[in-house]
Amino acid sequence: MVRDGNLRDSLKNVVALMVEFMRCESCLLYLLDGQRLVLCASNDAESDAVGKVSLKLDEGLTGWVARERRLLAISREAYNDTRFKYFKDLPQDTFESFLSAPVMWRNRVMGVINVQHRGPHSHSGGELEMITTVGEQVGCMLMLAQIARSESAEHLSELVLDPASRR
């Protein structure tokens, strides 16, 4: 997060580190774009969902985390939670466990980071602390990027995504 480079690469690196340290199969990072959360980084290099998948703040587990500004940990059958919303473009929607934290700067939600395991997984206190801390650090990184380029970007996702990849 502190190295020179573009924001897109920094977010990809954060996602890769989360996968490595959490030993999970999926990490997805969404950024707030107006009233929608847009998928801006994924560890799935073969997916073309980045920049295409988005949801409202009242949709799905991810929207709930952003709206409530709270951590959410589901150890099994996350897809059966009443707040769950299925996206056909995300194979991760069939995964069992779900851990999610808001990406925050001060008291402002800037996005959401999700970590998922294929099978059931009880999240440790260390994992809860880690995803919360990463959410706060990414929030600071995004705010610094937005300040540095405030005159050229209306929404955070514009700092990360190519205009052609946005709907």
Image (spheres, rainbow, N blue to C red):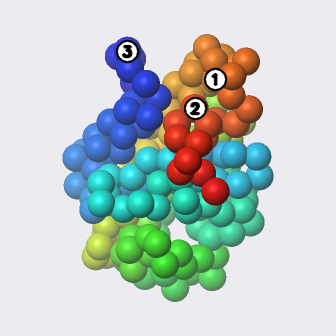
Q: Which residue position holds label 2?
A: 159
Q: Nearer the viewer, residue 113 or 153?
A: 153
Q: Is residue 90 left or right of residue 18?
A: right
Q: CA distance from mark 2 to mark 3?
A: 15 Å
Instruction: Say if mark 2 contacts mark 3, CB within 8 Å.
Output: no
Q: Which residue is located at x 54 percent, y 79 percent? A: 86
Q: Which residue is mark 3?
A: 4
Residue 94 screen position, x and y as percent: 39, 80
Q: Residue at x 39, y 52 (%)?
A: 42
Looking at the image, can residue 32 be seen? yes
Tell me which amino acid carries mark 1: Gln
Q: Residue at x 22, y 46 (%)?
A: 20
Q: Position of residue 89 (x, y in %)?
A: 46, 72
Element assignment for label 2: helix
What residue does disc 1 label?
146
Specify few, some or many for label 2: CA neighbours under 10 Å numbering under 14, 14-19, or 20 or more.
many
Q: Quadrant of residue 85?
A: bottom right
Q: CA distance from mark 1 to mark 2?
A: 8 Å
Residue at the front extreme, as displayed:
164
Q: Secondary structure at mark 3?
A: loop
- Residue 65: give x, y in percent of width and height: 62, 57
Marks 1 and 3 sit apart, C-alpha to C-alpha, by: 15 Å
Q: Is residue 81 left or right of residue 110?
A: left
Looking at the picture, which amino acid does disc 3 mark? Asp
> As rendered, which of 34 and 166 lies closer to the eye?
166
Contact, mark 1 vs mark 2 (Cβ under 8 Å): yes
In the displayed structure, 123 sits above or below 93; it is above
| 1 or 3: tag closer to the N-terminus | 3
Q: Quadrant of the N terminus?
A: top left
What's the residue type where badge 2 is placed? Answer: Leu
Q: Position of residue 69 (x, y in %)?
A: 67, 49
